[in-house]
Image (spheres, rainbow, N blue to C red):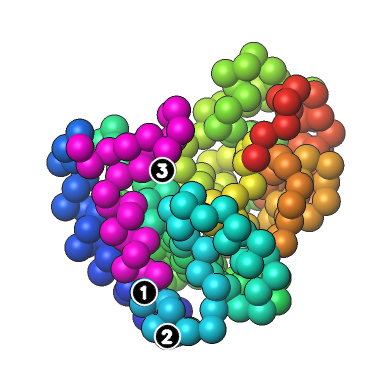
Amino acid sequence: MDTDEVLELLKRVAAEVITPRFRALMDTQIKEKRPGDLVTVADHEAEELITQALLQAYPDAVVLGEEAHSADPSMMGRFRYADHAFTVDPVDGTKNFVNGSPDHAVMVSEVRMGTTQRAWIWQPEHQTSWTAELGAGVRRNGVLVNRPATAEPPVGATSIWSRRGRIPEGLPALIGSWICCGVDYPHLIEGDCDYLVYGHTNPWDHLPGSLLLHEVGGVSAHRDGTPYDARSTGRGLIAAADPQTLARAVTACERIWPDRPVD
């Protein structure tokens, strides 16, 4: 499947099983995998449809879906060491989706020998697509994009630590993110923030955005500054607009990480 065909798959699946449920979910269609971690019938149906299509096109690939991993955590090991693999996040920002916020997305990435080769983000309520191919740049709705220059000092966003009252040293206080990696990373690329801080490193959440970021000169790394990739096992993640901002953020955020490591 070429890049446009995969994008059309995501659009079609969203139109069939996600958008019709937006602001129309019944209570019986929403569950908690663990406290605060929601999943809906749309997540399950979308993942099944996308996974089936990818396996039909690439029968030897490993497809790591968020919900499939939830049911079988051993899939992570098979994914990390596969020659060819995909990640699928059927409704990134499920909490937003359940709460009626348009800030949710469908995301897929393709990995070969541990390197992310292609990435897709479809924001159905914003009718905006983000795609990337390694070495070929980033496209928003089919048009090549470049990231604006980094602000001085950098402006950051985070999804968790602003609530803990911790602030980076030498940089502005962290602000809340859009609570959806499929929206966060595009905002980073558009210059609305200069770095993002996360406790979790789930590949279905971060591989698509990390490739997009890489293609506009950005970089993502673990809390100690080691590069983040499809085979990473480290904890904590900083995604930054450029290497200089990453270096500053790694140092500035050293003391904000939770006392107990999180995934």
Task: Read off the residue under disc 3.
Answer: 93
Image position of 12 with respect to 107: above or below: below
Magenta span includes 23: no
Identify the residue shown where x is 43% and y is 79%. 55
Secondary structure category for the residue under label 3: loop
Q: Nearer the viewer, mark 1 or mark 3?
A: 1
Instruction: Please say whether residue 213 is visible from this viewpoint.
Output: no
Q: Amino acid at mark 1?
A: Gln
Instruction: Residue 214: give x, y in percent of width and height.
Output: 67, 62
Between the C-alphas of marks 1 and 3, the distance is 22 Å
Secondary structure category for the residue under label 1: helix
Structural crowding at the residue carrying mark 2, measured as other residues with C-alpha within 10 Å and reported as few (<14), some (14–19) or many (≥20) = few
Horizontal side of 19 relative to 58 (left or right) equals left
129 or 29, nearer to the observer? 29
- Marked residue nearer the N-terminal end (3 or 2): 2
Structural crowding at the residue carrying mark 1, measured as other residues with C-alpha within 10 Å and reported as few (<14), some (14–19) or many (≥20) = some
Q: Amino acid at mark 2?
A: Ala
Task: Read off the residue under disc 2.
Answer: 57
Identify the residue shown where x is 65% and y is 22%. 173
In the picture as drawn, the residue positioned furthest to the top comes out as 165
- Marked residue nearer the N-terminal end (1 or 2): 1
Task: Read off the residue under disc 1.
Answer: 52
Identify the residue shown where x is 69% and y is 43%. 237
Instruction: Please say whether residue 224 is visible from this viewpoint.
Output: yes
Between the C-alphas of marks 3 and 2, the distance is 27 Å
30 or 141, nearer to the observer? 30
Bounds of the magenta segment: 28-51
